[in-house]
Amino acid sequence: MHVVATAGHVDHGKSTLVLHLTGTDPDRLAEEKARGLTIDLGFAGATLPSGRRMAMIDVPGHVRFLKNMLAGMGAVDACLFVVAASEGWKPQSEEHLRILDVLGVRHGLIALTKVGLVDDDLHELARLEVEEAVAGTFLEGAPVVGVDAPTGRGLDDLRTALDELLAVTPTAVDHGRPRLWIDRSFAPPGAGTVVTGTLAGGSVAVDDELLLAPAGTTVRVRAIQRLHEQVQQLEPGNRTALNLVGVSHGSVARGDVLVREGQWHHTDQLDASLTVLGRLDHAVSRRGAYLAYIGSGEHPVQLRVLGPQPIEPGETGMVRLHLARHLPLLPGDRYVLRDAGRGETVGGGEVLDIDPVLRASRAAPDRRVERVVAERGWVDAHQLALLTGERVDPTIGRWVVSPVAWTDAVERVTGRLLEAGPLGLDLATLDERDRAVAERLDDVVVEQGRIVAVDAIDPLDGHPWLDALAAEPFAPPAPPDDLGRNEIR
C-alpha cells in the first residue's frame, strides 16, 4: 500500500477532492463541518483502477494549523498537491511545497481544482502559473490534472494519474525494525486505547510487545486494523490503527512513537543538515525559539550551528539540535525547523548523527559508517547498527574497529608482551579488547591463562645466578636485582 498526503493552500478543495476520490469525508470533527475548514488530519483509503490500494492523509491548509499539517507528513510516499484554478498559487501553496521538499518527498502530482469556476483561458493560465511555481522542485514535470470534484469532471483522469504515479513510487522497506509515529489516539467504547499512524521499518502482529516512547511503557498489540479491515499482521508502508493493552489513551499523545525494544537508539542530541528556505529574510544562528517537527511530533530544540558563520537563506549547513525528549531516530530521518517566536518555517534537513561524540567545534557529521567508527575507535557491532541502521561484520570479537584504533591496540599489546618477557602476560590483567587483540597476534601462544611471545628471551638463560644456585641448592644465594619474582618462579 502507498500513503499519499494532500498539500496546498486553505480552501483549495483538498478535503472535497479526498471525499470524491475515496467516498470518505476526511473532516471528522464537528467544528470542521460547521466551519467548512480542515483543522486536523483526516484519513481515507481507496482502490485505484489497477487494483492498487492507496491510503490518503488529508492535511489542513490554513497557516494556523501548520503544526497539524506537519504531523501528517512524517511517513508519506507521495503527495497530491492541490491548487485551485480560481485562485492560483498562494502563500500556503509555497510553504507546503518547501516543507515537502525539505522532508524529502520526491513523488507527486498536481490537481488543479475548481476548474468548473473558470473558463478555458483562466484554466490554462492557472496551469502555467503552477508549472512555473514548481520549477526546480521535485514536482517539476509532474502531471497537472484539472478537476472539478463536485461534478466529477477530471476525477477518472486523476485516478489514472495517481495509479501511474504509484506504479513507479517506492514503498516502505521491511528492515525488521518497526516504528510507528502516533498521530492520533482515542478510546472507542469497549475497545480500550487505539492509536493511529503510518507503519514504517518493519512488520507488527497481534500480540507483539512494543515500547511506547518516550514514556518507556511496554504495551501489547491486541488488534490491528488497516483501512477498516481487521488483520493479524501488518507490513510497513500501511496506515493502521492499533488497539493497545497496557496504556490508557490519556497517556498517549501525538508525537509519541511505538518501536520494538532494543532495536533503536533513543537520543536527545543529534547532528543534522539544515537547508534554510531562500525566502527567509535573515540568516539562521543559535538565537531563536526553535521547534523541530520530527515524525508526528513537535519538539522544542536548542540549536547550534556547526561552523563559524550563521547559515544564510538558500544555503545548507550543519547544526546540532538538543531535544527536550529522547526519541528513537536513525540517520536519514527528516525534520522541519520552525521559529516559534517569528511564526515562520526556517527550513529543514536530514538527521546525520544520532549520538555525536565530538565537540560541536570539531564535528563534521555525515552518514558514513566509517566516520562513526573512526570517531569512536571501537564500536560494538550491535550498537553500530543502532547508530547507523547498517549491519557491519565485526573486525574482532563483537567490535568494529577503525584502522587507527587497531594499529594502536596491536602496538600497545605487543609492547606489553615484550616487556613481560618469556613468562608472558596474565590474560586476566588485560581488558576485553586487549585480550581479543592479543589472541589474534602472530607468534604468540596461550598457556595456563597466560599469553607468551614465541620468540621471547628467557632472562635466566645463561645467567650466573643459576650456576650459583646449582652449586649450593640447599643454601641458595640471594636473587640478583636484575631478576624479578615472576622470572624466578
Image (spheres, grey):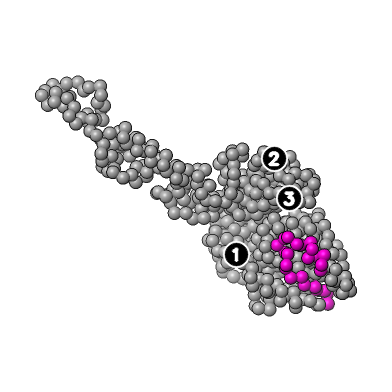
Kindly identify the amino acid type of the residue bearing the numbered disc 1.
Answer: Ala
The relative height of residue 335 versus residue 187 in the rendered view (above or below) is above
Residues under numbered marks 1 and 2 in contact, where contact means CB atoms less than 8 Å apart: no
**Residue highlighted by disc 1:** 172
- Disc 3 and disc 1 in contact, CB within 8 angstroms: no
Q: What amino acid is at disc 2?
A: Gln
Alpha carbon separation for disc pair 1 and 2: 37 Å
Q: CA distance from mark 3 to mark 1?
A: 30 Å
Q: What residue does disc 3 label?
A: 314
Magenta stretch: includes residue 137: yes
Q: Is residue 387 above or below residue 208?
A: above
Where residue 94 sits, quadrant-wise, is: bottom right
Give the extent of the magenta segment. 127-151
Q: Is residue 400 left or right of residue 430?
A: right
Amino acid type indicated by mark 3: Gly
Farthest residue, direction left:
471
Q: What residue is drawn where x is 40% and y is 49%?
A: 396
The residue identified by callout 2 is 309
The x and y percentages for residue 346 are 74, 49
Q: Of label 3 and label 1, which has the lower sequence position?
A: 1
Residue 186 lies, with reference to residue 165, above or below; the image says: above
> Mark 2 or mark 3, which is nearer the start of the sequence?
2
Mark 2 neighbour class, 10 Å CA radius: few under 14, some 14 to 19, many 20 or more: few
Q: Is residue 183 magenta?
A: no
Spatial separation of the CA atoms under disc 3 and disc 2: 14 Å
Mark 1 neighbour density, 10 Å: few (under 14) some (14–19) many (20 or more):
many
